[in-house]
Image (cartoon, grey):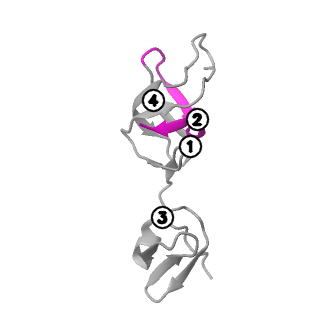
Amino acid sequence: MPANPRCPQCGLDNTYPDGALWVCADCGHEWSGEAAATSDAVVVRDSNGNVLSAGDTVVVIKDLKVKGSSIPLKQGTVIRNIRLVEDDAEHIEGHSDKIKGLVLKTQFLRKA
């Protein structure tokens, strides 16, 4: 028996089939079974749970030390035009005004 799909809205796996639809018991979201079969893509979320996509702008929520640089990323630094790391929901790539080629954990970011 295949495992139940995760809810596309809240990301939890407490779901059950109801006829041709899938229902999330936690948030009440309903979606078609076809959408469940095609939703194998990794969903990247920021620290507040907002879904991030390529090209979004994010803000750093905590001062971060940067390996290989003497310049820290200060709280409130804006990272524009982010890129998602393939098959990794915890990291994004981007550039700040002073530091290029950053790989950042999504737990320290919020969508702008």
Is 95 contained in the magenta span?
no
Q: Residue at x 63, y 19 (%)?
A: 67
For the residues marked 1 and 3, what is the alpha-carbon distance in whole angstroms?
17 Å
Instruction: Name the residue carrying label 2.
Output: 108
Side of 30 where 63 appears, left or right = right
Q: Quick one: quadrant of the C terminus?
A: top left
State if disc 2 and disc 1 touch (CB < 8 Å): yes
Q: Residue at x 58, y 43 (%)?
A: 90
Instruction: Name the residue carrying label 1.
Output: 47
Q: Residue at x 61, y 24 (%)?
A: 64
For the residues marked 3 and 4, what is the alpha-carbon distance in whole angstroms?
26 Å
Side of 37 where 63 appears, left or right = right
For the residues marked 1 and 2, what is the alpha-carbon distance in whole angstroms?
6 Å
State if disc 3 and disc 1 touch (CB < 8 Å): no
Instruction: Name the residue carrying label 4.
Output: 94
Q: Quadrant of residue 33?
A: bottom left
Question: Earlier along the polypeptide chain: callout 1 or callout 3?
Answer: 3
Is 108 contained in the magenta span?
yes
State if disc 1 and disc 4 touch (CB < 8 Å): no
Question: Earlier along the polypeptide chain: callout 2 or callout 4?
Answer: 4
Residue type at mark 3? Pro
Segment colored magenta: 97-112
**Tag 3's secondary structure?**
loop
40 relative to 32, above or below: above
Residue type at mark 4? Gly
For the residues marked 3 and 2, what is the alpha-carbon distance in whole angstroms?
23 Å
Q: Residue at x 58, y 35 (%)?
A: 108
Q: Position of residue 78 (x, y in %)?
A: 44, 26
Disc number lying in front (2 or 4)? 2
Residue type at mark 2? Phe
